[in-house]
């Protein structure tokens, strides 16, 4: 069995990745504009912008950051520059996890052998997958700590999802869900809830089995909601929708950092949990957002509450870590979400007031930096 090295990383450092939609400024439709934008960005931010699965998606990513303040500083230093390049090309960047009326058949696959291989395998499922997400890496002291955090944080991922929901519409329809992206993602092989791993040896054995049977080629073929990232020495949380406002992105990053640190330090200690319970909690967050039901098998946040109430309680429980990392001023963004709603709720409210999808996108796009 091959040994999987886990890179050195400073505990609780952050790396954040945002997957923006690339829109035509006039029609507000998705367009395959990412390659042209990436090719024209200034040199100082070229290594912070990357292609994604489809040419209508553009990823921006920080370097290694010690705090949410540093994450915000890095993004504020180069996202506006990328936005300016996009504007010169008649494009806009939009932050949400699904475009409300784009057609999968119109999307263009990005270049690269890996993307071609994935699409060849996924077929119609892959062609439907025009979603965007928020990924947060948290540095871990060692590989066993990384597994402990992956195991422990799975219970609380529905709360993070509920706070971030921004994908109620797909192909012109209201799906009835707050995060339809979640259900699209679950159609992919090797995606969703990973289950209890238990140890680094258990992780290596799982990877060896999957590789040995030709199921995956590399670790990143596992699209779990949370996974170890051996190359960076991190745990990568991937369950969230992409929030519609920058302040909400920062709030989620701060909450994830504090939660990962708390679990790494034994609060609470991970233990196996019924996969049916995990699936139920995740469904509730995807379907109902903050109004969904959350069952805490460990009782840390109370036995049963709404996702919104569980989120408020989580902020209270994590306050020692939030204070330690100096991110309390960003966590006010969680309060704002709880009081004023998520991106999914704002989308529906605008449509209910008579806005068409293009007007809705223009309004939310203009509020990103609020």
Image (tube, helix red, strand yellow):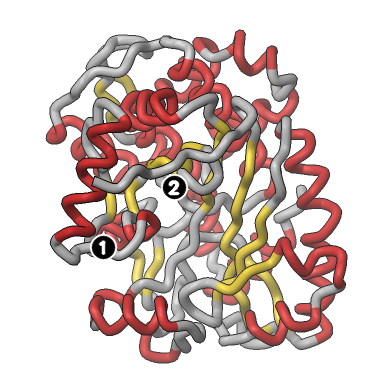
Give the class, few, some or many, for how many residues have Cα within 10 Å of label 1's Cα (few <14, many ≥20). Answer: some
Q: Nearer the viewer, residue 17 or 331?
A: 17
- The dot on residue 242 is none
Numbered badge on residue 216? 1
Q: Are marks 2 and 1 in contact (CB under 8 Å)?
A: no
Quarter where residue 43 is shown: bottom right
- The secondary structure type at the circle numbered 2 is loop
Nearer-the-camera pick, 293 or 248: 248
Which quarter of the picture shows residue 288?
top left
Q: Pick the residue in front: 277 or 11.
A: 11
Judge from the rendering whether residue 184 lies leftward or rightward of residue 145; answer left or right: left
- Asked if residue 61 is positioned above or below residue 45 in the image, the reply reads above
Does residue 142 show up? yes
Residue at which label 2 appears: 238
Q: Residue at x 59, y 76 (%)?
A: 358
User: How far across and down, in percent of the image, does residue 56 sit?
Assistant: 55, 79
Residue 271 image-quadrant placement: top left
Judged from the image, the secondary structure of the residue bearing numbered disc 1 is loop
Residue 2, given in percent of the width and then of the height, sits at 30, 48
Direction from residue 283 to residue 92 in the image, left or right: right
Picture residue at 42% right of the left edge, 10% below the top: 267
In the image: residue 229, left or right of residue 225: right
Point out the frontmost of discs 2 and 1: 1
Task: Quote the CA–CA distance across marks 2 and 1.
Answer: 19 Å
Question: What residue sits 43% from the left and 23% below the top?
Answer: 145
Q: Residue at x 37, y 32 (%)?
A: 150
Total labels drawn: 2
Residue 244 image position (x, y, % from top left): 60, 53
In this rendering, the answer to whether 345 lies above or below 290 is: below
Sequence-wise first label, 2 or 1: 1
């Amino acid at each position: 069995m091959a040994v999987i090295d886990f890179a050195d990383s400073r505990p609780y450092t952050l790396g954040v990745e945002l997957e923006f939609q690339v829109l035509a400024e006039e029609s507000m439709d998705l367009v395959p504009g990412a390659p042209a934008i990436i090719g024209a960005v200034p040199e100082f931010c070229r290594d912070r912008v990357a292609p994604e699965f489809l040419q209508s998606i553009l990823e921006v990513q920080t370097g290694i950051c010690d705090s949410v303040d540093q994450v915000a500083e890095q993004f504020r230093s180069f996202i506006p520059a990328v936005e300016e390049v996009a504007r010169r090309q008649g494009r806009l960047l939009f932050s949400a996890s699904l475009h409300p009326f784009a057609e999968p058949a119109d999307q263009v696959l990005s270049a690269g052998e890996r993307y071609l291989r994935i699409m060849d395998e996924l077929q119609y499922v892959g062609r439907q997958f025009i979603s965007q997400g928020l990924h947060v890496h948290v540095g871990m002291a060692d590989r066993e700590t990384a597994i402990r955090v992956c195991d422990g944080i799975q219970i609380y991922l529905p709360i993070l999802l509920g706070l971030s929901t921004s994908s109620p519409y797909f192909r012109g329809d209201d799906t009835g869900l707050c995060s339809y992206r979640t259900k699209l993602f679950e159609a992919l092989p090797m995606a969703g809830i990973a289950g209890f791993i238990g140890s680094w040896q258990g992780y290596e054995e799982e990877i060896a089995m999957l590789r040995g049977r030709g199921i995956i080629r590399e670790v990143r073929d596992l699209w779990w909601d949370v996974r170890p990232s051996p190359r960076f020495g991190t745990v990568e949380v991937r369950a969230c929708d992409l929030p519609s406002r920058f302040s909400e992105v920062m709030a989620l990053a701060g909450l994830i950092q504090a939660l990962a640190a708390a679990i790494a330090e034994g609060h609470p200690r991970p233990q196996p949990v019924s996969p049916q319970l995990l699936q139920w909690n995740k469904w509730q967050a995807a379907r109902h957002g903050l109004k969904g039901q959350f069952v805490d098998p460990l009782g840390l946040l109370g036995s049963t509450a709404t996702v919104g109430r569980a989120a408020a309680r989580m902020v209270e429980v994590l306050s020692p870590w939030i204070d330690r990392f100096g991110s309390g001023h960003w966590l006010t963004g969680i309060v704002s979400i709880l009081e004023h709603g998520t991106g999914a709720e704002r989308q529906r409210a605008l449509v209910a007031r008579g806005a068409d999808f293009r007007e809705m996108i223009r309004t939310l796009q203009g509020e990103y930096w609020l």
